[in-house]
Image: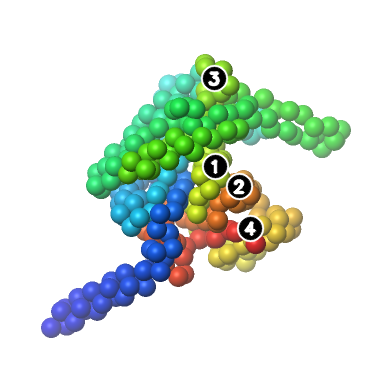
């Protein structure tokens, strides 16, 4: 009898959750959500299955998800296996001609198809592509500048075949969405010349795609819960001006800076809001979209 009562409470809780989700389902119906999938969750089979199931559920609920993924650790592993040495400039990997071939093989090949297979395995219709397909993402060579602390002279660092998105063609993705497919995009871009291939930071690629598509949400799945204050507490909501102040006083630092910059880049180009959240949280993207409390840090323009 006690077991039956417990089961009934669970069923009621589930029904209540579904009922409370209604206004959020209505809000996001027909909208585009760009999800950057990366971090350790991508290498965990159970987390991959949960992620794929959540993406398929979003599609079934009338949301149009576009997945952009990373793959840094997997690239490192393959370079080591092939005994290809890595060059660094000011701590940043230089993508040589030999390295970019491995990058494309890993990102547009193994990782991309693994995510596609996972989504298809949950009943979705995913299709994999890279930024080179139909010139989805056309890049310019990324130039990193470093200021010499003694002379105060800026020096340009050559990172090789590392690219910054210059043009994104949203029509390519819209065709798939209109045909009821879920696009899964590898962050490899085309250059201005036919033989040019660029390695793009996954967050940067996701921000560029979200901005071009005027997405309702850009969701950056990472290995941290969100943006934290100096006490280590997650800040659930931030505006552009608040982020600038937190960077200035050192609260936001290190690897979090490029993530919030990516969020602001998308917002400046028409994205309604960006979320930085822990991709390892079970069903985190569903909590963020379809519940009142959400997950991670929501960043808006104002």
**Residue 273 location (% of width, % of height):** 55, 56
| Disc 3 secondary structure class | loop
What is the distance, in whole Å, between disc 1 and disc 2 at their CAs? 7 Å
List the residue tagged with mark 1. 212
Is mark 1 in CB contact (under 8 Å) with mark 2?
yes
Q: Give the mark, 2 or 4, whose residue is nearer the N terminus.
A: 2
- Nearest the camera: 291 or 179? 179
List the residue tagged with mark 4. 301
**Residue 235 location (% of width, % of height):** 58, 65
For residue 228, above or below residue 103: below
**Residue 19 location (% of width, % of height):** 33, 73
Is mark 3 in CB contact (under 8 Å) with mark 1?
no
Relative placement, left or right, of 254 versus 32 is right
Q: Is residue 47 visible?
A: no
Number of the label disc, if any, that sits on residue 269: 2
| Disc 2 secondary structure class | loop
- Give the residue drawn at x 62%, y 66%: 231
**Residue 245 location (% of width, % of height):** 72, 59
What is the distance, in whole Å, between disc 4 and disc 1 at their CAs? 17 Å
Q: Give the mark, 4 or 1, whose residue is nearer the N terminus.
A: 1
What is the distance, in whole Å, between disc 3 and disc 4 at their CAs? 35 Å
Is mark 3 in CB contact (under 8 Å) with mark 4?
no
| Disc 4 secondary structure class | loop
């Amino acid at each position: 009898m006690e077991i039956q009562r417990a089961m009934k409470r669970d069923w009621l809780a589930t029904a209540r959750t579904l009922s409370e989700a209604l206004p959020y389902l209505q809000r996001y119906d027909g909208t585009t959500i760009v999800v950057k999938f990366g971090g350790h969750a991508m290498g965990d089979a159970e987390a991959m299955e949960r992620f794929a199931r959540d993406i398929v559920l979003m599609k079934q609920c009338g949301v149009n998800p576009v997945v952009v993924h990373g793959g840094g650790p997997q690239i490192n592993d393959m370079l080591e296996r092939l005994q290809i040495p890595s060059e660094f400039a000011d701590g940043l990997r230089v993508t040589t001609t030999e390295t970019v071939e491995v990058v494309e093989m890993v990102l547009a090949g193994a990782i991309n198809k693994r995510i596609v297979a996972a989504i298809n395995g949950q009943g979705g219709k995913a299709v994999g592509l890279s930024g080179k397909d139909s010139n989805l993402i056309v890049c310019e060579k990324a130039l990193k500048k470093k200021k010499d602390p003694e002379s105060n002279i800026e020096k340009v660092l050559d990172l090789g075949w590392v690219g910054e998105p210059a043009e994104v063609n949203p029509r390519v993705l819209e065709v798939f969405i209109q045909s009821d497919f879920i696009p899964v995009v590898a962050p490899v871009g085309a250059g201005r010349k036919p033989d040019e291939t660029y390695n793009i930071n996954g967050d940067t690629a996701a921000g560029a795609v979200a901005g071009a598509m005027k997405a309702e949400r850009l969701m950056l799945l990472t290995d941290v819960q969100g943006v934290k204050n100096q006490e280590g507490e997650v800040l659930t909501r931030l505006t552009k001006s608040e982020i600038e102040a937190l960077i200035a006083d050192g609260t936001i630092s290190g690897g979090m800076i490029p993530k919030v910059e990516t969020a602001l880049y998308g917002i400046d180009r028409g994205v309604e809001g960006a979320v930085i959240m822990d991709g390892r949280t079970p069903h985190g993207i569903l909590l963020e979209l379809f519940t009142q409390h959400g997950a991670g840090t929501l960043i808006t323009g104002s």
